[in-house]
Amino acid sequence: MTVTTAPTSTGQRTGLIGNRIVLAGILVYLLEFAGFAYAGVGSLYNEPGTSPKDVLASYQGDAGGYGFLVGWMAIVLFGRLAIIVGIRKALRDSGRRSGLMDIAVIAMGVSVVFEVASVMMGATAAALLRSGATDGVLVADRAAWYFNAGIYSPVAVALVLTVVAMWTSGLFPRTLCVIGSVAAVTCAGAALLTDPAHWETQDALSNGMLAFVIWAVWTGILLLARSTSEPSRK
């Protein structure tokens, strides 16, 4: 596996050649909040230590909202995957093809599967409550939390590999790569604290996803600018 490729077929390395995929991806990804607002669901799971009574109360009357979110999230979370795909395309088009990016795409795809599974378990809990299977609600709620906690590991892997590819390409601002590194480190920390005893620390580290959003928006704007400023290639 190589981090970068040799010069392009013309024998010359090009500058950064952008695209619209990354910016479109982050915009689609952020639509998940619109889905939450429409569904009227405040949370996808309950934190460890929540009493069984409070767990059951949290799913009261939410079956329809969770059902909607299963489909909605399965659509908009592809935006997060598109961010990595767009960066891979930019590196490839710019003559810096990286095998690391192929793994990064797979890792981010795994994170999408985990997050959709978390929503599905929340929907399952709400449906079980309506049928009176209270014990099943508690099990589904725990599964939803663990699936959600599992999101951070593949996101961290995807970010580490992507930031390395961006840095070594020499095409992206160092500050942008540093922001991506911060997001990767906080996600890795959250991933390593997937333990009910440390859920508060994990929850605090999960706020590092804000750095991910900033990094993705900046990258998307940069690549959009380069996609419109670069001359058309034949």
Image (spheres, rainbow, N blue to C red):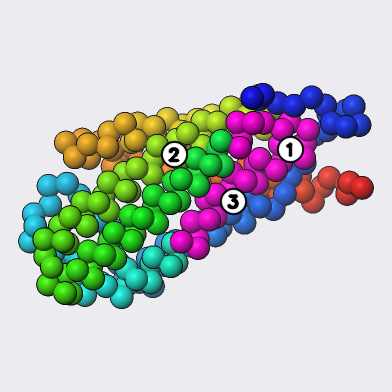
- Name the residue located 88 percent from the left edge and 49 percent from the top edge: 232
Disc with the residue nearer the chain's start (3 vs 2): 3
Task: Provide residue 118's location: percent of width, then percent of height.
Answer: 33, 55
Q: Amino acid at mark 3?
A: Ala
- Residue found at x 32% / y 48%: 147
Q: The disc labelled 2 sits on which kind of residue?
A: Pro
Quadrant position of residue 96:
top right
Most foreground residue, 174 or 195: 195
In the image, which disc is placed on residue 92? 1
At mark 1, the secondary structure is helix
Q: Main secondary structure of the magenta part?
A: helix
Q: CA distance from mark 1 to mark 2?
A: 22 Å
- Magenta region: which residues? 74-102
Whether residue 220 is visible, yes or no, is: no
Q: Is residue 80 magenta?
A: yes
Which badge, 1 or 2, is on the more N-terminal residue?
1
Q: Residues within 10 Å of mark 2 (few under 14, many from 20)?
A: many
Name the residue nearer the viewer: 131 or 42.
131
The residue labelled by disc 2 is 154
Task: Give the residue at mark 3.
Answer: 82
Number of labels in the image equals: 3
Residue 93 at what x, y percent from top left? Answer: 77, 40
